Amino acid sequence: MRHPFATALLASLLSCSLAWAQDTAKALPPEPLQRVLQSVVTVQSRSDAQASTSRTLGQRREGTGVVIGPDLVLTIGYLLLEAESVDLVDHQGRRIPGQVRAVDNLSGLGLIRTLIPLRLDAVPLGDSDTLPTPGKLWTLGQSETALTELELVSRKVFAGSWEYLLESPLMTLPAVNNWSGAGLFDDQGRLVGIGSLLVQDVFGDQVPLPGNLFVPVNLVKDPLPDLVRSGKRTGPATPWLGITSQRLPSGGLAVLRVSPDSPAARAGIAVGDTLLALQGQTLQDLPDFYRRVRALGPAGSRLTLTVRSEGQSREVDVLSTDRATALKRPSGI
């Protein structure tokens, strides 16, 4: 059944969307509202045509970032992967050159440091862990002049096919199109999330309801000083295998893509294979897979996968690595 809150909310959205648009300007106190409106910038990046991510994300990428320091902008990390150049455009049309300071593969967030003063007020970071569900929030993307009111409707686990796991993302309705790196703000104008994806099911019900996934800012609060200083978190890196996969109704995980020269590729895993088990225990779904891989140790740990190829099963030993080592370092890191 559809989540009962989803049904009520959908009816409300259909009847009240125009009223929301008219009342948005009054949603935040004047001072936080002005700070939010001038803190959101356009992010334009360009990578080398030969970069591995250019084939999947494009050589030129554009999205949104939010000013969180005198020369610091928080955005979504995929805009910055292997970037050779980064430019920001503020609400006045001023073009500001920047450099990638960090791409945090664990959270999926990225940081840009500007090469000249921003002269923009920084938005304070809110507490993304204590937000009520359901609850009212606001988003603003690049080139937008008014905030859009959203409803935080769930914190369901999200597992991306590219070895990405968020235990408690911010799932919002209604779905918006300008979500890539967009800021998500609470009722005091504090930044609580960064836009990442359009998802087809915000509840996990039998009747899917599309919305947006925002990455909670609390995921980078603790490592932020290290990310700014060195471009990475301290401590061991998260293990990466180089497998893009999805759950099969019949059981196991179908291998959709294997990154060139990745641990999986070197171990002989190929597109069309099925991952059946890890350390001899059956794989249930993507979250189960990622959690168990990480529980075996950081990047550099060895693990054993049971793989089915052309009807035959075999044991495959894989030595994980840090995903950052498989990517060209962005200019500035």
Image (spheres, rainbow, N blue to C red):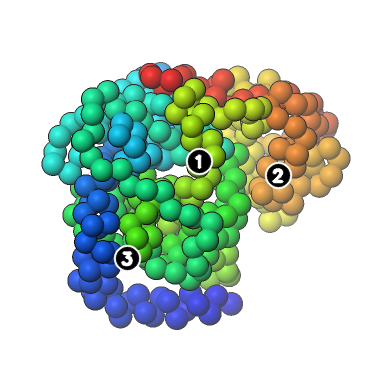
Label 2 Cα crowd, 10 Å radius (few <14 / some 14-19 / many 20+): few
Kindly report which numbered mark, 1 or 2, lies closer to the viewer in this rendering: 1
Of the numbered discs 3 and 1, the one sitting upstream in the chain is 3
Residue on which the image places disc 2:
291
Residue type beneath disc 1: Val
Front-lying residue, 65 or 35 = 35
Residue on which the image places disc 1:
220
State how far apart marks 3 and 1 are (Cα): 24 Å
SS at badge 2: helix
State how far apart marks 1 and 2 are (Cα): 20 Å
Of the numbered discs 3 and 2, the one sitting upstream in the chain is 3
Image vertical order of residue 81 relative to residue 149, above or below: above
Q: Quadrant of the C terminus?
A: top left
Identified at 41% across, 40% down, the residue is: 76
Residue type beneath disc 2: Arg
- Quadrant assignment, res 233: top right
